[in-house]
Amino acid sequence: MPENSENNQTHDWGYWTLGIIAALALFWGLGHYALWGSEDRWAEITREMLLNKDYIHPAINGQVYFDKPLLSYWLIVFVTFFCNCLNEFVVRAPSALSALAGICATVYIGRKLFERKVGITAGWILLSSLGFLFWGRTAAADMENLAAIAIAVAWFLAREKKAGFFSYLLFYLICFLGAMAKGLPALVVPVMIIIPYVLMKGRWKKHVKFSNFLAALVGGAIYFLPFYLASVMEMPPHYFNPASNLSGLELVWQENILRVFNPLDHNDEYWFSYFYHLPRIMAPWIVFLIPAVITVITRWKDLKKNDRWLAWTTLLIFILFSASSSRRWYYILPIMPFCALMIARFLCSSSHEKWERMIIEIVRWVVVAVAIIEAISIVFASLWGQIFDLDLPWMLLLSTPISGVAALVVMFIDERGDRQHIKQFTGMPESFGGIILGGTILICGLFSFQLPSINKFRSEKPFALKMKNELINIKPENIIIYPKIPVKLIFYMKLSRPVHVVNNIEDMKKIINSTTGKFVIVSYNKEKYLSELAKIIPRKVVDNPDYKEDFTPFENKEKARKIYIWLINNKTRGIK
């Protein structure tokens, strides 16, 4: 076979393999575990959009919730049209699809600026980074933000030399759509990193033209349209504005501009927090990012323009997010594609020094060690289950050793020196392809099989589904929640109308006095809340709720927050 034909086949296999494994890693088991963390916001807002046929006013329990823009909810609604249901898989699917798009854009940028093996390697690095898989399988807007930034940069690089009005318009639409999912960083970051690119290439004058500015204005108008519609269109009768009484645009200003200087509720992170959050999201390949940065610094004079631009891009993104007063570890996710490209560029270099080759070998043996531990984990897991009297999930017991054995097979092939097959299979160079593939198997196994399997130890969803059946005859108007709404409970119970949420006992008394028949009080097991409830309900009733959310193994019973529910008739239960 001619050399060119063989190379094309290798590259084609690399793209196909990366795409298939990425799809499996992101979608396998995606709906097999209950909502967690802030996922309930996206789930409940989408449910109420579908329930009330109002797609302009996002709301939780009837309270308008414009803290995040609309697009991330619309994407979930869009998926429901194909699946004809709303469940955990549907809620998370837009993030997984965005992650796939982010990988494709990263591969393209690497291929466009450098060469195919750099792009493919960056795709593998990105896929198997902990922060990427974590948020790619989570219902949120952060992966849409990352994807929009990477796609916008990829589109600009593709059209930069022949850009016209429609090329600029699509670029700004990508940016503004990203802003409609998460916030203005999706607009600011691509523009901020493209400016150095055109300056370094000496082509900045080519883009200072009317069609560029006109496209930006059109894109901005499209961005503001939903907020305008939300301000003029009538809300459902039972909807109400939040206590802040801020409109959608005012909340955009607060969340994206004011938060940069005043962190509001996100004031617990130091200015240097991303120095330890970056290793967190890039694990385990942060071990390659450090020498990649050192290499860039020590060889700066010899670097080509594209390498310098990549280094400046990564640094500018890091500085931008560090300069903001509002910091969270997932805010800096947009830096990941560019870090992956820096790592890929370092690994694909043919001029590794001795210390660089030593780091690669250390990582190789770390992957082997972890694979061995996973391969024999079934023995330790069985003993652990017997010692703690735990019925461990069969998926956990089965998937962990399988992942370990699969990684060991890859590493065995790699160690035998038969690396040509790995190169052909992955599209990565022979010197490290086995390491990245073995690590990817272990990490993807963790997120796709092992973590979803421990869902059986969580109690929120089973409790909520039980309450859905037990309280089926209770009207939503007769449900009182104090003092914070458990959004997961509301979502899984699929209530047709809002419930009462009160934050003081006096308001609860007023609702109780106007309620006839049975009513329900929902609260948490915090002593602070129980003591307040005891002011209007006898303490013996408070201490013996009709329904309790169960504790699960490993939970601290003094700190775990569990839901208590009281089914009360004020004539028979001693309401004060």
Image (spheres, grey):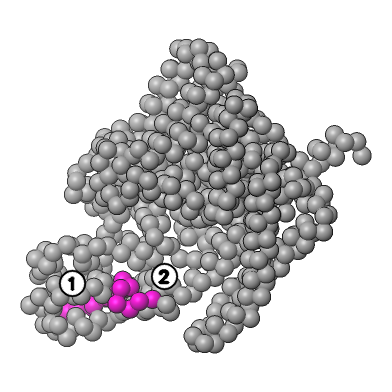
Residue type for callout 2: Lys
Tell me the tag on residue 461: 2
Tell me the tag on residue 383: none
- Quarter of image, res 413: bottom right
Residue extent of the magenta highlight: 555-569
Tell me the tag on residue 528: 1
Q: Is residue 392 above or below residue 286?
A: below
Of 490 and 434, nearer the camera is 434
Residue 41, position as x, y percentages in the image: 36, 55
Q: Quadrant of the C terminus?
A: bottom left
Residue that sits furthest to the front in the current view: 354
Asked whether, in this view, residue 544 is left or right of residue 145, the answer is left
Q: Residue at x 33, y 39 (%)?
A: 324
Q: Residue at x 83, y 54 (%)?
A: 418
Q: Confirm whether residue 219 shows in the render.
A: yes
Residue type for callout 1: Lys
Q: Is residue 279 above or below residue 538?
A: above
Is the residue under label 1 in contact with that under label 2 (CB below 8 Å)? no
- Quarter of image, res 231: top left
